[in-house]
Amino acid sequence: MAITGVSQFGKEYCTKNMTPGKKVYDEKIIRRSGGEFRVWDPTKSKLGAAIYKGLRNVPIFNGMKILYLGISTGTTASHLSDIIGADGLIYGVEFSSRSVRDLVPLSKKRKNIIPILGDARTPENWTHLIEKVDLIYEDVAQPDQSDILIRNAKIFLKKGGSVMIAIKARSINVATNPMEIFANERKKLETYFTISDAINLNPLEKDHIFFVAKVK
Amino acid sequence: MTTYIAFCPIGILATNEQRKPVSFIAFPNNAKKRADEIENCLKKTISDLEKKIISQIKDKEIIFEIKKEGYSHEFPNMSGDYLRTNTAEIARTNNIVKSKTELNQLFHETTTELTVRKMRISIGNDKLLMQAINTTDELTKQINTMTMRIREWYGYYFPEIIERINDNEKLAKYISETLYRTDIKGIDVEESMGANLAKEDLEEIQKYAKKIIILAEEKRELEKYIEKKSTQIAPNTTQIIGAPLVARLIAHAGTLKKLAGFPSSTIQIIGAEKALFRYLKGSGTSPKHGLIFQSTFIQRAPKQSRGKMARTLASKISIASKMDYYKSSDKVGAKYKTDLEELLKKEIAKKPQHQHQGKPTFQHKNKGINKNKQSFDNYNNKFKKNKKFGKKKFSQKKR
Ligand SMILES: C[S@@+](CC[C@H](N)C(=O)[O-])C[C@H]1O[C@@H](n2cnc3c(N)ncnc32)[C@H](O)[C@@H]1O
């Protein structure tokens, strides 16, 4: 099964560079007759890691709108940006102004990324900046991140929309066994979503799980 | 009947209870002006455009999506939901854009403008203070490294003086000002074990010594600057624990706002995250004090009182930093400092005498050097710790 917008060359997964000649992080570039491709580094992107670990059901398509919570400097977002193309849009929420400082120049080159300096916990402060979306991607490394996702999904997710969330056991609780934490978070998410995929990111990311889900 | 009002980058929308649009006012056709209007709508007071839309509504009850003086609000509200679902359609029917691409562009330009404006004001004095304190730490480390080098280097020529002058800056001054061996009490130049270096060899060492002096001066100036900034943004807290420690706490917390938001139990262990982590994982004991351990109140306290001292200190810092953040006119700094002094006196008075016994001090011969070395080691440990925390933060931010 292929993933929309993702090409495989040998062992590597790539997205077609929407800004040829420009790299985003220190990713490898592959040139083919079809154009220039950016290798998705699974050690730098959790979605990248999930794909390397076999995730095939990635709910993504050209022209879609995405709300990205915890976009940071845009490493993963840059691949999503390649995939959704010029008609799509990523609303990237990030509360660290230092990260946004690096994100703004990226968004000037990739007009489908919109940088928002804000806290995922308080959507009331930035709701006025976004439309409803087809996908919410969350990677905020916070203990209450499942609740944050549910709250945002209720407000911003279109009917039939999907979510992807990366959960780091340590940011929920350092003392509890990761498997127990994952089961717990799954239960929380299942109050609102139906989970289609759960990918353990070991060893690419230690004690991380990646969920893909849809609203019930 | 109730009307709901909400806004987004294209304009302000009012809907009725059936979620039907009843009125819409488009924002001006320019990213900067749009951003201005959005900023106006974000204020607690009613903006001109909001006044205009209210005047078009017959209903008495109006519900906004965010807090507005004199009105109720509901988040999210019906109008906001309608606006976010039908943005493209509203934009098209009101002739705001001709295509999807144009709409995307409008959102991109307006929000980028707003984000950049927010970024500009996010850099406050606390960030400057953080850079300054981190720079002094780096200067200290650099000065130590350079002095260790110069001790080796100049030691080829005049090892006796290296042994004699423990103070880093004094040694650098000696080399830069005197350079050639001179008789000093107890040191006979004729007897020196040093090699006879040529003028050009010595001059290179001298240049290096001058650099150390410049760095030490810079560090002192930076310390004055820290004192000034810290007093400016956190007068009460600075009065209690002194500027460098205030700066370090703010640097760890990220901003004064965050520090002020911490409960005192967190303030007590800022800077001891590693130990806390070990404790939570089941090895090690719960950390009693982090950065605030550097405070003289704890340093001067007898060992068995330090936990208590740290708790009290943390709670005072917690209150004082809140007052500083909210720019309260109450001046609690001086009083808290006296309170702490009194508590410290009491604790010292309680101190059992046997603490003083133990090893007799018969190593005075090397006392000076040892003292010096110890503070150097302490410093290095501290630095290593900080560096690790720095790294951790960085790798978190990276993606
Ligand atoms: C692990 S990083 C994200 C990496 C990014 N998803 C990628 O793969 O390129 C987590 C980010 O979430 C941000 N973050 C944490 N809590 C947040 C919150 N409540 N609101 C917004 N951003 C948050 C952090 O500042 C950090 O940049």
Image: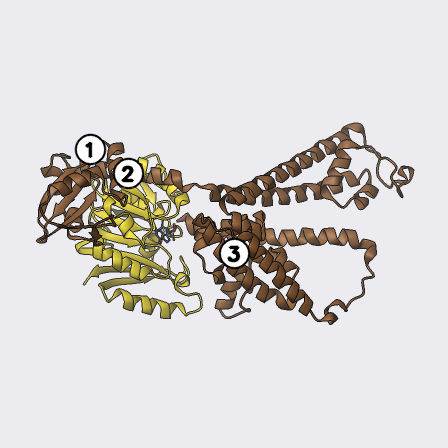
Amino acid found under the numbered disc labelled 3: Ile
Q: Is residue B224 visible?
A: yes
Q: Nearer the viewer, residue A107 or B285?
A: B285
Q: Which residue is mark 3?
A: B317
Q: CA distance from mark 2 to mark 1?
A: 31 Å
Residue shown at the point (53%, 56%) measured from the top left: B271
Residue at 73 percent across and 70 percent down: it is: B353
Circles 2 and 1 on the same chain = no
Three-letter code for the amino acid on which mark 2 is drawn: Met
Q: Residues within 10 Å of mark 2 (few under 14, many from 20)?
A: many
Q: Tell me the SS state at disc 2.
A: loop
Q: Given the image, what chain letter belongs to the residue carrying mark 3?
A: B
Q: What color is chain B drawn in? A: brown
Residue B284: horizontal and vertical position, in percent?
Answer: 55, 69
Relative to residue B145, is residue B36 drawn left or right? left
Element type at mark 1: loop
> In the image, which is nearer the foreground, mark 2 or mark 1?
1
Which of the marked residues, 1 or 3, is nearer the chain's N terminus?
Answer: 1
Same chain letter for marks 3 and 2:
no
In the image, are marks 1 and 3 on the same chain?
Answer: yes
Q: Which residue is mark 1?
A: B28
Of circles 1 and 3, the one toward us is 3
Q: Using the image, name the chain to which the residue with label 2 belongs.
A: A
The correct choice, above or below, for B299 with respect to B285 in the image is above
Q: Which residue is mark 2?
A: A18
The quadrant where residue B193 appears? top right
The quadrant where residue A50 appears: bottom left
- Name the front one of labels 3 and 2: 3
